[in-house]
Image (spheres, rainbow, N blue to C red):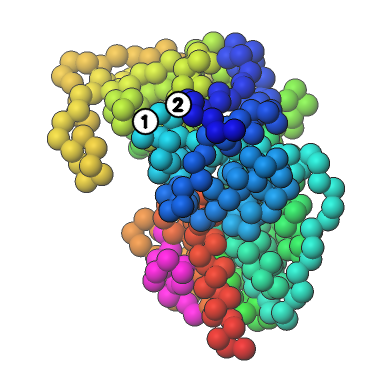
Amino acid sequence: MANMSLKKNPMPVQEPNVRNHNFEEVALGYTYEQAVDEANRCLNCKHKPCVAGCPVAIDIPAFIAKIREEDMEGAYEILSQSSSLPAVCGRVCPQETQCESKCVRGIKGEPVAIGRLERFVADYHMAHNTAAPAVPVQNGHKVAVIGAGPSGLTCAGDLAKAGYEVAIFEALHLAGGVLVYGIPEFRLPKKIVQKEIDNLKAIGVSVDTNMVIGKVLSIDELFEMGYEAVYIGTGAGLPRFMNIPGENLKGVYSANEFLTRVNLMKAYQDSSNTPIQHAKSVAVVGGGNVAMDAARCAKRLGAENVYIVYRRSEAEMPARLEEVEHAKEEGIIFHVLTNPTEILGDENGFVHGMKCVQMELGEPDASGRRRPIVKENSEFVLDVDCVVMSIGTSPNPLIRNTTKGLDTNSHGCIITKDDSGLTSREGVYAGGDAVTGAATVILAMGAGKHAAKAIDEYIQSKA
């Protein structure tokens, strides 16, 4: 029966004052009944506007129709035709600005909860399906993928399904890229990521960890090993700083280091070999999803006060609205229209405060957002003993410095000729944050998908 409610089924979540003391997943997921009820809100539009908003072109009405029919495996089959990581996407993709923003139900109410339904179907499949996936017939061609993040995993998955022998080379000791080192456990449980990776391995993708391409092997050597094409999906893991006084003090972290210690190295556990400072008051500088993740981690590590310090207003924050709301619910304090000017240290070189100035918004800058300008006589000191800088990242220069003929721009991002991901080197493709700079998981996946198609066409044209 159609559900004409103007509102989505709410997502069950842990209570804020419980979850801000643990690293368990905040969102608990729909029940079977909630998923079917939400699926009945979909109008099954013939022109499928939601599909146009999906970077990997999932047939959204078709998979939701299967949920209405209570054919959860059928729904999963449709999802997996387009997405190699549906359980991940259902949790971390900004559906509100993509597929759900195109939903007809959103005109007079809330759109269908597409992301929550995607998560439900993927989780249901993981919990109930024990059959090994079918291994595709190999076509005799080899492709190397550099980086086991969302872009590389997607490219590898699509190529493996097309019959290619695919090897992923990952610099860290664990596959997953930003999914394991950047996004906290309470937003994306690592067992979910591992299960998605295991699914790729089951269809023939090999994953070699601790393989720093540019050091252990070069791209030229990969071609000499018989790989006919190479995909670079190395992300953008090089942190940026503000270059203000005091950034070299003890207790100042990049968000990358802070989150990697927490997420990948489990610094929040008492048994961790790489513990992190348990600060009393933490300032996180920035307003994106990474800043929210760092702030919420700091709260869970026991900080009494955690501040988001952002130079524009809350309306300009690039973070997802849900992440901002969750952070506020958990007790994170927002200092918007505020900018640091100096980090203060004590006689032992530890952080003991941060000078800030208040800002106001002027005329729009090149990004279209109003430029923040300093208010006169507005300086104040924020009492903190830890500062996390979350103001963006750029690609690591290792690949570009060790690969001849690979063009990059002034930001160190690899230049591609078109959406196919083809670089200035024949047979070398790139995508995700290594090309765009820091962006979303789903956009990186979309780039990997486009590149896989282009690589297939390139190799088949030479066969």
Q: Toward which corner of the image does residue 111 lie, by quadrant?
A: top left
Indicate the position of residue 308 as horizontal and vertical percent values: 42, 22
> Secondary structure under badge 2?
loop
Quadrant of the drawing holding the C terminus: bottom right
Q: Residue farthest to the front?
A: 1
Can the viewer see residue 425 in this picture? yes
Residue under the image location 20 percent in, 28 percent down: 361
Q: Nearer the viewer, residue 91 or 63?
A: 63
Of 189 and 336, the residue lying toward us:
189
Relative image position of residue 385 (x, y in whole percent): 49, 18
Disc 2 to disc 1, C-alpha distance:
7 Å
- The residue at 60%/17% (across/down) is 20
Image point 70% across, 40% down: which residue?
70
Q: Which residue is mark 1?
A: 108
The x, y position of residue 145, in whole percent, is 62, 65
Residue 414, magenta (yes or no):
yes
Task: Determine whether label 2 and label 1 are within 8 Å by CB.
Answer: yes
Region of the chain picked out in magenta, as a range: 413-426
Crowding at mark 2 (Cα within 10 Å: few <14, some 14-19, many 20+) = some
Instruction: Out of 136 and 107, give the one closest to the viewer.
Output: 107
Q: Quadrant of residue 374?
A: top left
Q: Amino acid at mark 1?
A: Lys
Residue flagged by tag 2: what amino acid is it?
Leu
Q: Quadrant of the N terminus?
A: top right
Asked if the magenta segment contains residue 151, the reply would be: no
Q: How many numbered callouts? A: 2
Q: Which residue has dot 2 on it? A: 6
Among the two numbered marks 2 and 1 on one chain, the one whose residue lies closer to the N terminus: 2
